Amino acid sequence: MSQLTNPPAKVLRGVRRYIGTNAALLVTAAAGAAVFSLLITASADVYEAVANGNGLSGLDRPALDLAVSLRTPAGERWVTAFTNLGGTVSMVFITLSLTGAMYAHWRRRSILLMMVIAASGSLIFTSVGKTIVGRARPPLSLAVPPYEYAPSFPSGHTLNSTVIALMLAYLAWWLSKAAWVRVVAPTVAAIWAVAMGLSRVYLGHHWITDVIFGWIFGLAWLALLITVHRILLRLDRRDRRVAEKGGVPDQPPERAIEPDGGPEAASSTETH
């Protein structure tokens, strides 16, 4: 009888050992997949509402009317100056400057890789979305000059600002040992993304659903990238532990992804 039960027992013990060893990986993957799925579903709902002219798109005109009612000459000048920071030239300069400063401080290739992937994907999604949907912007009579004529959906300022600002915040949170950085960086990034989106509606350059889609889809893209990054970090850390015990690591010594835990863990490995 023991011979019959022994193989299943071995299987169960193996499964238990595997889950115990890889619990963090499984939890990270499950949480990331859940967040990504929810955000993608929400962004798809916004797209469907815009495409069919119903549902959430019913907020577009009331939100624009409210924005127009809140305008003042001084407000228009200040908000225009701020929203210009989300333009292509300004965002490229800001992104390169902050990314370069972070790389100079922490010397991590992951900073460059993550920013290139995040920003490139954001730009591609914006271009494809505008081409596919081809939505008209709000009437010029309700917009603040200088006027914009490219398709309205999605808001490129919002999507790009959300992705770039929050990715920079995530990298700072990951690499910094200072508690205040881990609080201030995400807070400032979130305020930047929200304010940039609202500025587009305030000036009459976008409908509110263009902005909402930019926020949600940007967060979905970030959830995917960050989940993959966390999994790779944990795999790398596990490989190093195997190597320290005399085993054979799954990856060669020259790694593209640095160890988990930020600067504390970096002291035991070569920086790139």
Image (spheres, helix red, strand yellow):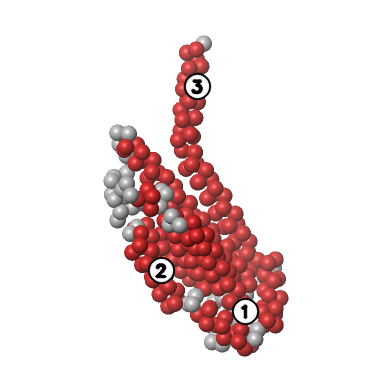
- Residue drawn at x 57%, y 62% as measured from the top left: 216
What is the three-letter code of the residue carrying label 3? Pro
Marks 2/1: CA–CA distance:
28 Å
- From this view, report whether residue 106 is shown above or below residue 61: above
Residue ID for mark 1 = 202
What is the three-letter code of the residue carrying label 1? Tyr
Residue 93 position by quadrant: bottom left
Residue ID for mark 2 = 98
In front of the other: label 1 or label 3? 1
Cβ atoms at labels 2 and 3 below 8 Å apart: no
Residue ID for mark 3 = 8
* Viewer can see residue 162: no
Task: Give the total of numbered labels.
Answer: 3
- From this view, report whether residue 221 is shown above or below residue 230: below
Cβ atoms at labels 1 and 3 below 8 Å apart: no
The secondary structure type at the circle numbered 2 is helix
- Residue drawn at x 65%, y 66% as measured from the top left: 49
Mark earlier in primary sequence (2, 1): 2
The secondary structure type at the circle numbered 3 is helix
Marks 2/3: CA–CA distance:
55 Å
Quarter containing the C terminus: bottom left
Mark earlier in primary sequence (1, 3): 3
- From this view, report whether residue 252 is shown above or below residue 132: above
- From this view, report whether residue 259 is shown above or below residue 58: above
Where residue 245 sits in the image (x, y, percent)?
Answer: 32, 34
Mark earlier in primary sequence (2, 3): 3
Where residue 126 sits in the image (x, y, percent)?
Answer: 50, 69
Marks 1/3: CA–CA distance:
65 Å
